[in-house]
Image (cartoon, rainbow, N blue to C red):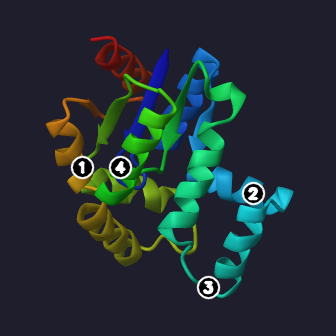
Amino acid sequence: MTRLIFLGPPGAGKGTQAKALADHWQIPHISTGDILRQALKDQTPLGIKAKGYMDRGELVPDQLVQDMVEERLTQADTKHGWILDGFPRTVQQAGFLEALLDRLDHHGEKVVNLDVPDEIVIGRLLERGRKDDTESVIRRRLEVYREETAPLIDYYTGKQQLVIVNGNQSLEEVTVEIGQAISC
């Protein structure tokens, strides 16, 4: 049973790796962005609540995101494993997730940190050519990542769940390294 949490800066390849591995193992790739888009599309009660925040240009509150993750992790297709991408983003969310997984009797998850140097991430994101991906915006996103998400590295290291993977390799090499890292 494979249960993985992906960490890493924007542009590290979390989504790409999560999709590839989820397809390979036939388990769901659970991205908070995808959950949110699906909830909006399906007009679920949580989706309608989230839409109100988004329409006002506000961030969706942690509690609402947590409720959506909980709803998704209780669906039948998660019984044999899952890959979480984009959650948790903070130590507080990690604590919530740990309590949720205990309640669901999901144990043995590993946390994969895709480690990629800032300059490589900046280059990758600039290559995507999105209008909002300017170098200054990308550098700010990396600062925010370090402030909010990097403490998770210490959190999961302390719980002996963290594996660090060199994300500055080819897609195939990263996939192989993740497979080797989690089979230990």
Question: Reading the chain from its start, which is encountered first: label 4 or label 1?
Answer: 4
Q: How much space separates mark 2 and mark 1, taking CA atoms?
A: 34 Å
According to the picture, the residue beneath numbered tag 4 turns out to be 94
Residue 91 lies, with reference to residue 17, above or below; the image says below
Mark in front: 1 vs 3: 3
Question: Reading the chain from its start, which is encountered first: label 1 or label 3?
Answer: 3
Secondary structure at numbered mark 4: helix
Residue at image point 50% right, 39% down = 84
According to the picture, the residue beneath numbered tag 2 turns out to be 39
Q: How much space separates mark 3 and mark 2, taking CA atoms?
A: 18 Å
Q: Around disc 3, counting alpha carbons within 10 Å, would you say few (fewer than 14), some (14 to 19), or many (20 or more)? A: few
User: Percent from the top left, x then y, of residue 115?
Assistant: 27, 41
Q: How much space separates mark 4 and mark 3, taking CA atoms?
A: 25 Å
Q: Quadrant of the C terminus?
A: top left
According to the picture, the residue beneath numbered tag 1 turns out to be 117
User: Percent from the top left, x then y, of residue 6?
Assistant: 41, 39
- Location of residue 74 by image quarter: top right
Assess whether mark 2 and mark 3 are in contact (beta carbons under 8 angstroms). Answer: no
Secondary structure at numbered mark 1: loop
Observer able to see residue 35 = yes
The mark found on residue 2 in the picture is none
Question: Reading the chain from its start, which is encountered first: label 3 or label 2?
Answer: 2
Secondary structure at numbered mark 2: helix
Residue at image point 64% right, 80% down = 53
Q: Amino acid at mark 1?
A: Pro
Q: Amino acid at mark 3?
A: Gly
Q: Amino acid at mark 2?
A: Ala
Question: Reading the chain from its start, which is encountered first: label 4 or label 3?
Answer: 3
Q: Is residue 119 left or right of residue 93?
A: left
Q: How much space separates mark 1 and mark 3, taking CA atoms?
A: 31 Å
Of residues 117 and 45, which is closer to you in this image?
Answer: 45
